[in-house]
Image (spheres, grey):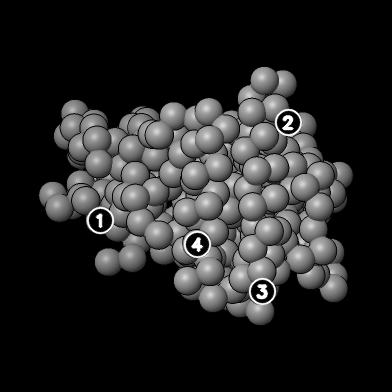
Amino acid sequence: MKLMDSPEAKDKLVHGITMFYDNVMEQKDLRHFFFGMKIETLVKDIQLYQDFVMPKPDRYYREPMSQTAPSALQIKVPQFDELQIVLQNNIRAAGYLKSQVPMIAAKLLELFEESRAQLADENIKVWKPHEVTSQLVCDLYNASRTDARLEKNGDVYGSRGFMYPFWTRVSTDTKTLVFIGQGFPVGIETPKERVEAFCKQVNEKITHQLFQVRESPKGPVLFARHTISYASGVPTRMLMRAAKQFATTFEAAMNMDTDKLLVNLIR
């Protein structure tokens, strides 16, 4: 869900964020979380980078959240746990449904952590939209303890260092990044109906990412994609985190293939 998809939604969210910011700044054990930051910066960064927050499994929102800021900026675990409680209470007080609160809180905390990290950066770690190219994405992957190569069609193929190999497509005309995962059949004779039945099982279990089956010259392929707008720029930390989360989700789907209908590249 978009956090600010209308003026009304923005006003509602800003109200909740403002309550949270004020409450944090009033507590001496927590106020350092927003040291040197203004509410206007937090709101602006949510609008710019919310597309880079990947959807998570339902269980993620039922458990204590992890810090995503660089280790040097992370606060003590009890303090971060307290932040989560304060944030969820303020979001609820802003008028959101109880069922919406955990997801919204998780998204906001990840974006707040990125805002904090950008404030501490000595070198800019956000690409401007006109700078983004497939080569730049490939170079980022390779500089981040993962292996990647540029394919002939311009897609970036990420392999080692990711939980499962996948492609990243840079569409400069639409200003989007597209993650693409594919599970190829063990043979052209693999029945499409069996792969479709397997895909249905995957979608029932992995509800935060849509999987589909498509035809190919090699037979039916398990297929997933996730699109991110970079019209407002690319925060590189969030891009790497999103790429790794997409690969991890696709690995979870491939590991469900107990009948070995598909070629698992990491078995």
Contact check, label 2 and label 4, Cβ < 8 Å: no
Point out the frontmost of discs 3 and 1.
3
Q: Which disc number belongs to residue 60?
A: none
Q: Could you tell me the amino acid type at mark 3?
A: Leu
Spatial separation of the CA atoms under disc 3 and disc 1: 35 Å
Question: Circle 4 — which element?
Answer: helix
Q: Could you tell me the amino acid type at mark 2?
A: Thr
Of residue 253 and residue 50, the one placed in the foreground of this image is 50
Expressed as whole percent of the image width and height from the top left, the position of residue 95 reads 53, 28
Q: What residue is pinned by disc 4?
A: 82
Spatial separation of the CA atoms under disc 4 and disc 1: 36 Å
| Residue at 65% over, 43% down | 19
Q: What residue is pinned by disc 1?
A: 255
Residue 253 in sight from this viewpoint: yes
Q: Which disc number belongs to residue 174?
A: 2
Q: Could you tell me the amino acid type at mark 4?
A: Glu
Expressed as whole percent of the image width and height from the top left, the position of residue 244 reads 50, 59
Spatial separation of the CA atoms under disc 2 and disc 1: 33 Å
Question: Circle 3 — which element?
Answer: helix
Of residue 41 and residue 54, the one placed in the foreground of this image is 41
Q: Quick check: 87 above or below 123? A: above
Is 195 left, or right, of 41 in this rendering?
Answer: left
Is 187 left, or right, of 15 in this rendering?
Answer: left
| Residue at 50% over, 30% down | 96
- Label 2 vs 1, first from the N-terminus: 2
Spatial separation of the CA atoms under disc 2 and disc 3: 34 Å
Contact check, label 3 and label 4, Cβ < 8 Å: no
